[in-house]
Image (cartoon, rainbow, N blue to C red):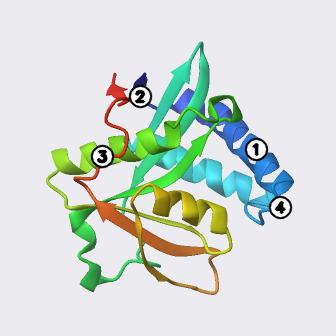
């Protein structure tokens, strides 16, 4: 499977992927991304990340199956003592319901580790919704260790995880950069 940089024209399709994830989260009883008012700021941030070459897509038959953004460190969460420059930061990792059961999320995390190794960085890090226990468990199963939970008043995310960049959990099914 191939992973490609996102283009400006992909913004609407990315938002469709997020809306699909919002519905799935709601139906699963998970309190994440419930406020539709956050969509416009999310899309604006995606456009910034796309323009900076940080957002990537996996497509199949013309449809986006997944996306990942390799973002700068979010200093609402990561401290100077964490050596934030020594990590790649995963953000907006979303897989479509059509890709469920294919391990694509894990493959994207392995790909992020490959990117970290190429940049000679030691860690793959992320933050996720503080109340999304299922997502936190997924990351732990993928080899992430809980670092700590931060709770700034203006954020709902804040569960911080990291794993060494050397970790490869899905060696037989890696994504090729195209």
**What residue did someone put label 2 on?**
3
Q: Secondary structure at mark 4?
A: loop
**Picture layout, residue 47 above or below residue 125:** above
Q: Secondary structure at mark 2?
A: strand
Please state the horizontal and vertical placement of residue 68, each as a whole percent of the image.
Answer: 48, 44
> Gap in Å between the C-alphas at discs 3 and 1?
30 Å
Q: Assess disc 2: are there few (<14), some (14-19) or many (≥20) residues with their C-alpha within 10 Å of its C-alpha.
A: some
Q: Secondary structure at mark 1?
A: helix
Pointer 1 or 2: first along the chain = 2
Pointer 2 or 4: first along the chain = 2
**Which one is in front in this view, the residue at disc 3 or the one at disc 1?**
3
User: What number is the disc on residue 168?
Assistant: 3
**What residue did someone put label 1 on?**
19
> Gap in Å between the C-alphas at discs 4 and 3?
31 Å
Residue at image x 41%, y 27%?
A: 4
Please state the horizontal and vertical placement of residue 126, each as a whole percent of the image.
Answer: 44, 63
Please state the horizontal and vertical placement of residue 98, each as a whole percent of the image.
Answer: 68, 28
Please state the horizontal and vertical placement of residue 8, each as a whole percent of the image.
Answer: 52, 32
Viewport quadrant of the N terminus: top left
């Amino acid at each position: 499977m191939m992973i490609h940089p996102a283009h400006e024209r992909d913004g609407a399709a990315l938002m469709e992927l997020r809306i699909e994830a919002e519905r799935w989260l709601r139906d699963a009883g998970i309190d994440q991304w419930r406020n539709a008012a956050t969509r416009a700021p999310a899309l604006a941030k995606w456009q910034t990340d796309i323009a900076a070459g940080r957002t990537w897509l996996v497509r199949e038959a013309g449809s986006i199956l997944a996306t990942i953004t390799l973002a700068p460190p979010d200093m609402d969460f990561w401290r100077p003592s964490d050596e934030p420059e020594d990590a790649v930061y995963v953000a907006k990792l979303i897989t479509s319901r059509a890709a469920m059961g294919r391990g694509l999320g894990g493959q994207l995390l392995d790909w992020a580790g490959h990117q970290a190794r190429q940049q000679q960085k030691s860690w793959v890090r992320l933050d996720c919704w503080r109340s999304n226990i299922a997502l936190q468990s997924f990351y732990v199963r993928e080899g992430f260790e809980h670092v700590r939970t931060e709770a700034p008043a203006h954020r709902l995310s804040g569960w911080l995880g990291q794993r060494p960049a050397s970790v490869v959990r899905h060696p037989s099914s890696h994504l090729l950069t195209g």
